[in-house]
Image (cartoon, rainbow, N blue to C red):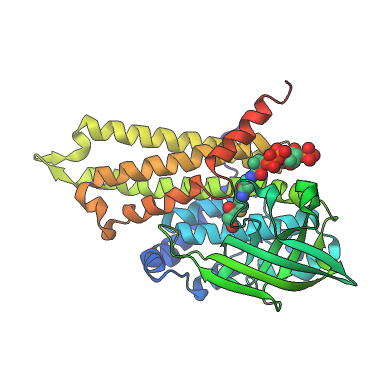
């Protein structure tokens, strides 16, 4: 067993860290306040290969492994969770299923535009009445000649505001439950696709969270991903991978807040001494570090399992659950260590606290992660 990152992983991590230091960190507050990530930053991330880390080079990707992608999301999220989830949702939830379930023609048609950042990807599963219960979606499709025609509504779609490429889930017959669901690759500028709104949110404010109406959206039959009726399997498989990306985002947020709290505790003086001389602060730092290290081990191991072609469903749910709960814990404690300064915007930990909360909710609430984990633990009953 080797707990060291490889030399290649270290080089990647250090180069992304440097990029983040110069290009992301200085504008993280602006991204939060203006509720948008500048196009120029998205273009720089694409140029660096951050929008297709684990995709093959012949499809425009960087040809690395999943652990590399996890390191990218973690490093970016240390400074800006909105930029972290842009990369994560785009890569795991849109490029991922096209790579895993798309035929060669679909991969060549869609992936180079995505890896180059010409199109930003998203995943349209959630609906107003189908969140955790993803098998009960109402968005429907029917076959008409050489096309499929999709009608319905989707909400909470990360990256939706870019109107790039979407993986859209729809059912042919609700009585078939999850077996009636199919997945389609959809250009979100197709007539009938309407952006209803980009939500105002508590955190990850630079990230689009979009509501769509889909009115008779005509999609060529060639855009069916996998076979008809395989959509739920594609969604679950995609989310198994995506959840490791959210774990990495949460880990990054926690680390960003911890770094700031640790540094602050050494310079902030009260009662004539740095506050880190107090055991109350020391124990907080120890508890924060413990949560981060536990989450990191489980997250990297989930990525390693996927890279090694082993079953990783349980570990991905575990990583998302542990890392997101570490993020909410650590960011809350980081504010407490900063005292009143933690509550004002200049010190950034308040933004991280707001950003952390969503990691316990999206790509499956932590209650859903516990369902996944416990079902697998009890599978032989
Ligand atoms: N991996 C692989 N297969 C899975 C699976 C998993 N994690 N979970 C369920 N399945 C399979 C089951 O094995 C079963 O397969 P068979 O038909 O072959 O038997 C099938 O799916 C149905 O399983 P269940 O009967 O257990 O399904 P269910 O309807 O009870 O739901 C659930 C199970 C785990 C709760 C699932 O609905 C789920 O994961 N819900 C959460 C959805 C989610 O994460 N949504 C987030 C959307 S993306 C987002 O957040 C926004 C964004 O843009 C970032």
Placement of the N terminus among the 4 image quadrants: top right
The quadrant where residue 21 appears: bottom left
Check the image and name the residue furthest to the bottom.
Answer: 191
Residue 321 in view in this figure: yes
Rendered-image quarter of ligand 1: top right
144 vs 91: above or below: below
Report the residue at 60% width, 39% height from top. 317
Q: Toward which corner of the image does residue 35 lie, by quadrant?
A: bottom left
Residue extending farthest left: 272
Q: Position of residue 293 (x, y in %)?
A: 46, 36
Nearest the viewer among 113 and 200 is 200
Q: Nearer the viewer, residue 141 or 53?
A: 141
Q: Residue furthest front?
A: 175
Q: Quadrant of the C terminus?
A: top right
Counting from the top left corner in percent of width and height, residue 374 is at: 62, 29
In the shown orientation, is residue 294 left or right of residue 351? right
Residue 320 appears left or right of 223: left
Is 146 or 106 nearer to us in this picture?
146
Residue sitting farthest toward the right: 145
């Amino acid at each position: 067993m080797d707990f060291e990152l490889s030399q290649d992983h270290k080089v990647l991590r250090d180069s992304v860290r440097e990029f983040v230091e110069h290009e992301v960190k200085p504008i993280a507050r602006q991204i939060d306040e203006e509720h948008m990530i500048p196009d120029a930053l998205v273009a720089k991330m694409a140029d660096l290969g951050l929008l297709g880390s684990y995709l093959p080079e012949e499809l425009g990707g960087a040809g690395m492994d999943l652990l590399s992608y996890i390191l990218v999301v973690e490093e970016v999220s240390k400074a800006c969770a909105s930029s972290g989830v842009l990369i994560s949702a785009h890569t795991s939830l849109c490029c991922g299923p096209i790579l895993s379930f798309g035929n060669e023609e679909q991969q060549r048609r869609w992936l180079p535009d995505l890896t180059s950042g010409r199109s930003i990807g998203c995943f349209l599963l959630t609906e107003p009445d189908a969140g955790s219960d993803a098998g009960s979606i109402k968005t429907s499709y029917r076959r008409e000649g050489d096309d499929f025609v999709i009608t319905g509504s989707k909400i909470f779609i990360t990256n939706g505001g870019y109107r790039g490429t979407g993986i859209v889930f729809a059912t042919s017959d609700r009585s078939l439950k999850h077996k009636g669901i199919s997945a389609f690759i959809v250009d979100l500028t197709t007539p009938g696709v309407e952006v209803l709104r980009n939500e105002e949110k508590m955190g990850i404010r630079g990230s689009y969270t979009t509501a769509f109406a889909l009115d008779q959206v005509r999609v060529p039959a060639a855009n069916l991903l996998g076979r008809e009726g395989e959509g739920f399997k594609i969604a679950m498989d995609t989310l198994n991978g995506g959840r490791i990306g959210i774990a990495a985002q949460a880990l990054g947020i926690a680390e960003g807040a911890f770094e700031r709290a640790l540094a602050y505790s050494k310079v902030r003086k009260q009662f004539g001494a740095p506050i880190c001389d107090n055991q109350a602060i020391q124990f907080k730092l120890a508890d924060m570090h413990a949560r981060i290290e536990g989450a990191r081990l489980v997250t990297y191991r989930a990525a390693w399992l996927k890279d090694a072609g082993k079953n990783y469903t349980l570990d991905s749910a575990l990583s998302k659950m542990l890392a997101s709960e570490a993020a909410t814990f650590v960011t809350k404690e980081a504010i407490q260590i900063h005292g009143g300064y933690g509550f004002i915007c200049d010190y950034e930990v308040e933004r991280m606290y707001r950003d952390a909360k969503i990691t316990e909710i999206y790509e499956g609430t932590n209650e859903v992660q516990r369902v996944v984990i416990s079902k697998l633990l009890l599978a032989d009953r």
